[in-house]
Image (cartoon, rainbow, N blue to C red):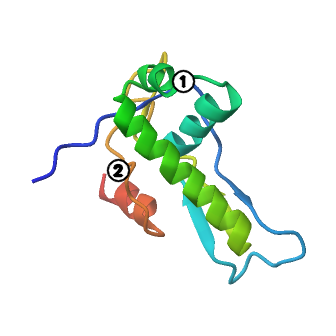
Amino acid sequence: MPRPRKRRILTHRHRQAIYKPAGQALLGLPQVRLLPDELEALRLADLDGLTQSQAAERMGISRSTFQRTLERAHRQVAVALVQRYALHIVGRSGDTLRGQSSQRAGAGHSPAARTPGAARRARRQE
């Protein structure tokens, strides 16, 4: 049985958004999903210019986990840009926002759910 996923500390609540190539309809366009922890890793490393160690500490995870998360985020963005796919930034997560209790930050929701409709199904089961 794998180890449970450690909660990440996110300092920003990013809203769900979809970015797509200009001139293409969203209907039928393949989508690449970017999870909240992946967006946070991009923000800390690329926008704020923190080292991986500093960013990992802020997110409450190990440096190696941060490195994997950042690599996955870079790959997702690159695929969306190069293949001209829509980039879907997922807004809801089970991760903890700094300064909020885990109940308000979405405790009980699976942050690793990547299949369409998984969040909706999870909310129905609660």
Q: Is residue 56 visible?
A: yes
The mark nearer the N terminus, 1 or 2, is: 1
Q: In this view, does 57 lie to the left or right of 3?
A: right
Mark 1: amino acid = Thr
The residue labelled by disc 2 is 110
The residue positioned farthest toward the top in the image shown = 99
Q: In this view, does 10 lie to the left or right of 106?
A: right
Residue positioned 70% across, 31% down in the render: 47
Would you place residue 57 above or below residue 4 in this image? above
Which of 67/101 is in front?
67
Residue positioned 43% across, 68% down in the render: 115
In whole angstroms, how far apart are the C-alphas of marks 1 and 2?
A: 28 Å
Residue positioned 43% across, 58% down in the render: 119
Would you place residue 76 above or below residue 37 in this image? below
Which of 11/99 is in front?
11
User: How many neighbours does mark 2 have within 10 angstroms: few (below 14), some (14-19), or many (20 or more)?
Assistant: some
Mark 2: amino acid = Ser
Q: Is mark 2 on a helix, strand or loop?
A: loop
Splitting the image into 4 quarters, where does residue 114 fall? bottom left
Splitting the image into 4 quarters, where does residue 8 fall? top left
The x, y position of residue 39, in whole percent, is 58, 42
Question: What label does residue 51 carry, if any?
Answer: 1
User: How many neighbours does mark 1 have within 10 angstroms: few (below 14), some (14-19), or many (20 or more)?
Assistant: few
The x, y position of residue 11, in whole percent, is 55, 24
Q: Is mark 1 on a helix, strand or loop?
A: loop
